[in-house]
Image: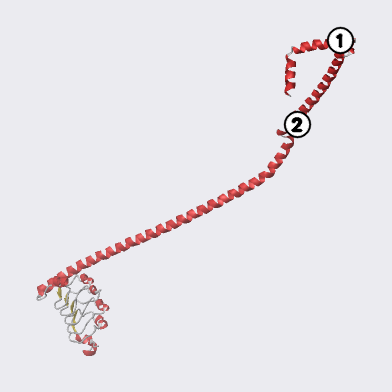
Amino acid sequence: MTKAGSKGGNLRDKLDGNELDLSLSDLNEVPVKELAALPKATILDLSCNKLSTLPSDFCGLTHLVKLDLSKNKLQQLPADFGRLVNLQHLDLLNNRLVTLPVSFAQLKNLKWLDLKDNPLDPVLAKVAGDCLDEKQCKQCANKVLQHMKATQADQERERQRRLEVEREAEKKREAKQQAKEARERELRKREKAEEKERRRKEYDAQKASKREQEKKPKKEANQAPKSKSGSRPRKPPPRKHTRSWAVLKALLLLLLLCVAGGLAACRMTVLQQQPLCTSVNTVYDNAVQGLRRHEILQWVLQTDSQQ
């Protein structure tokens, strides 16, 4: 690998005013560090070498105004080639370039450009046209800059579109995730409510069971006195009354039997002629006649017959 410093001595020796000629130096790579130390070298000739690439730090040589890279083997330029904002004259004749970096649109000061003898993309080749004279080379610079600006705008729009699509996709993912989290929260909330309701019912059931157990002794205590002195056990008085009524009926029956026996003796025996029997028979006859006409006797007789 050959460098200018080893073949042609120190680069300062090659500096002529603001021009530095490194053409025909059999260079395989650009001595960027040595060039950066020569900010006065605004015109750089690297033509007719063996350069296939340019390092990215080459774009830091922003002091360059005129650059000749013709007749090398460059297949592409660095992505940030547009950093060479002071570049006005660029010769890329006879290389292996197919496209130019989008940052090429930033070379706003570019006035002269030669892209002949490169396997350019058909669209770019048509835009560039020929560079056979000063006028064509200036037109080439202007048209290529406009084309690259349009390309840059299209790429920026495409980038924005992709970003928008990605943002929309991200929003959808976030919305989906939020909906999922909301469903999970709702499910947990419902499960918690159901568990709380189940526990409340169990608690109410336990309280009700406890109240029932507490009521049972009270009911037994309340029912015991009722069985002794409550309203239901009022049947004994009727029993007592019935018992007294039965005794009374028995006494009346005995009295009637006695009277009937006496009457029978007075009416059917020889005693009927006695003064006592005569009076008894008279009273009996009168009483029977009076009572037969009285409704009470009929009621008593009916009641007695029913019983």
What's the residue type where badge 1 is placed?
Answer: Ser
Is 126 rendered above or below residue 277?
below
Left or right of residue 301, residue 265 in this image: right
Is 101 rendered above or below residue 206?
below
198 or 230, nearer to the observer: 230
137 or 185, nearer to the observer: 185
- Secondary-structure class at tag 1: helix
Q: Residue at x 80, y 12 (%)?
A: 287
Label 2: how many Cα within 10 Å (few below 14, some 14–19, many 20+): few
Please give the residue where the numbered disc 2 appears in the rendered image.
236
Q: Residue at x 43, y 58 (%)?
A: 181
Residue 147 image point, x, y percent:
17, 68
Colour approach in the figure: secondary structure
Choose the circle earlier in sequence order: 1 or 2. Answer: 2
Residue 283 image point, x, y percent:
83, 11
Please give the residue where the numbered disc 1 appears in the rendered image.
279
What's the residue type where badge 2 is placed?
Answer: Pro
